[in-house]
Amino acid sequence: MGKGIIIAYIGLLLLIGLTPPGQGVLGELIAGMGSELLSWLHVPAFAALCWLIAGQFRRRGWPQALAWAAGAGCAFVFGLWLEVLQGSVEGRVTASEDLVIDTAGIVMAAVVAAYRPLTLRHADGAALRAPVR
């Protein structure tokens, strides 16, 4: 189930990121939000993406620090390629500021994780607190 959520979330981010403003219902919604608000929505979006990916690595037994580093790296690379792809969509532009804001969301997730480690669950539903490394 976890992988399906990540794939659906990445698909949603791609759909939003590659929809031309003003075209279709989603495009009209994007155009109406304004670029400032849209840019700052990257913070929670990429924090959630990093959290989801790191959680999957933790469920596979990765050490806490390595899982977060890998989750952060995956989220950053996704943000980088999303910006590259946006340059090929009419009405969208590639913006290095968006990548900086994406990184702020990734850092936010890592800071929260430093103070609240992911709680994992066994197949029987019992909670397993992973040791912080």
Image (cartoon, rainbow, N blue to C red):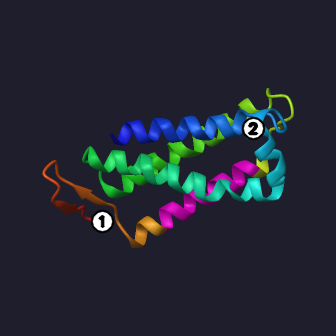
Say few, some or many: other residues with alpha carbon within 10 Å of mark 2 (under 14 / 14 to 19 / 20 or more).
few
Closest to the observer, 66 or 4: 4
Say few, some or many: other residues with alpha carbon within 10 Å of mark 1 (under 14 / 14 to 19 / 20 or more).
few
Dividing the image into 4 quarters, which one contains the N terminus?
Answer: top left
130 magenta-colored: no
Q: Which mark is residue 132?
A: 1
Q: Secondary structure at mark 1?
A: loop
What range is drawn magenta here? 98-111
Tell me the quarter of the picture where residue 3 sits.
top left
Q: Which mark is residue 123?
A: none
Q: Residue at x 79, y 26 (%)?
A: 88
Up-down: is 132 above or below 4?
below
- Magenta span dominant secondary structure: helix
The residue that label 2 is drawn on is 25
99 magenta-colored: yes
In the rendered image, residue 85, in percent from the top left (x then y), is placed at 72, 30
Q: Residue furthest bottom?
A: 115
Up-down: is 118 above or below 70?
below
Residue 27 visible in the picture: yes
Q: Amino acid at mark 2?
A: Val
